[in-house]
Amino acid sequence: MTKAALFDLDGVIADTAVYHLKAWRKLIQDHFNQDVPDGLLAQTKGLSRVDSLNAILSGLDLTVSEEEFARLADEKNDLYRQSLADLNEQGILPGISELLAELRKKDFHLALASASHNAPLILEKLGLSDSFEAIADPRKVGRGKPAPDIFLAAAKGVNCKPENCIAFEDSSAGITAIKAAGSYAVGIGKQAELNADICFPDTTSVDLDEILSNWQENK
Ligand code: BG6
Ligand code: MG
């Protein structure tokens, strides 16, 4: 059986999720002189740039023209990319390099299923460009998370059936997407928020043997 492990990037492989949130907060402060509440910001986790901006604007009851929307999205990306300037191999979350090696040893194909258009740049900075056999391109998939499309594309990229994939995520939208794809969802974070098939509080506590035995039991 061909099996694969599909990975989200921000907040799972790299410690970059917080940079997205900081960039959104600064953008909205600069343009609208408003603070984005933590709860609203948290809802953007895993969502595409456009979906995130839509969620923030509607959460704050703000309306902008199409042109302004595009400018805001570009400016957020500029802010975000500035925060990536010093990113290097140290930015790989603890335990992840070992997890990737362990998965490879157990004959899992590895694929990336990130919503980020910046994923190839980030992988390069982390020294992980060659670590994944397939990188699903969010520009080419129809719907963003919580729809399953990016996980289905990642599974297809390594010729693996979605039901033979385990997938790692730190966002609730991402966990919903994995389950909708029919794969086994490993959450990184708080289970009360994620509702994953199995959940670990952080990347250091991920236990692959526990994941694999739980996956088999629940298949
Ligand atoms: C996801 C992040 O990985 O990528 C989201 O969790 C982000 O916060 C999304 O909006 C899109 O990223 P980018 O880099 O294309 O703006
Ligand atoms: Mg994430």
Image (cartoon, helix red, strand yellow):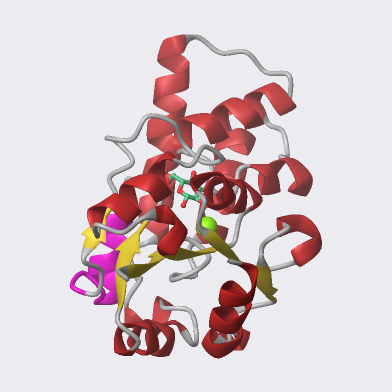
Find residue 143 and report its image quarter.
Answer: top left
Residue 162 is at least partly visible in this image: yes
Quarter holding the C terminus is: bottom right
Q: Is residue 70 magenta?
A: no
Q: Is residue 195 above or below residue 70?
A: below
Q: Is residue 177 left or right of residue 84?
A: right
Of 13 and 121, nearer the camera is 13
Of 32 and 102, nearer the camera is 102
> Which residues are drawn in magenta?
118-130
Quarter holding the N terminus is: bottom left
Of 118 and 174, nearer the camera is 174
Q: Residue at x 64, y 25 (%)?
A: 57
Q: Residue at x 30, y 69 (%)?
A: 2
Question: Seen from this angle, which residue lies furthest left?
Answer: 130
Q: Main secondary structure of the magenta part?
A: helix
Q: Residue at x 61, y 86 (%)?
A: 210
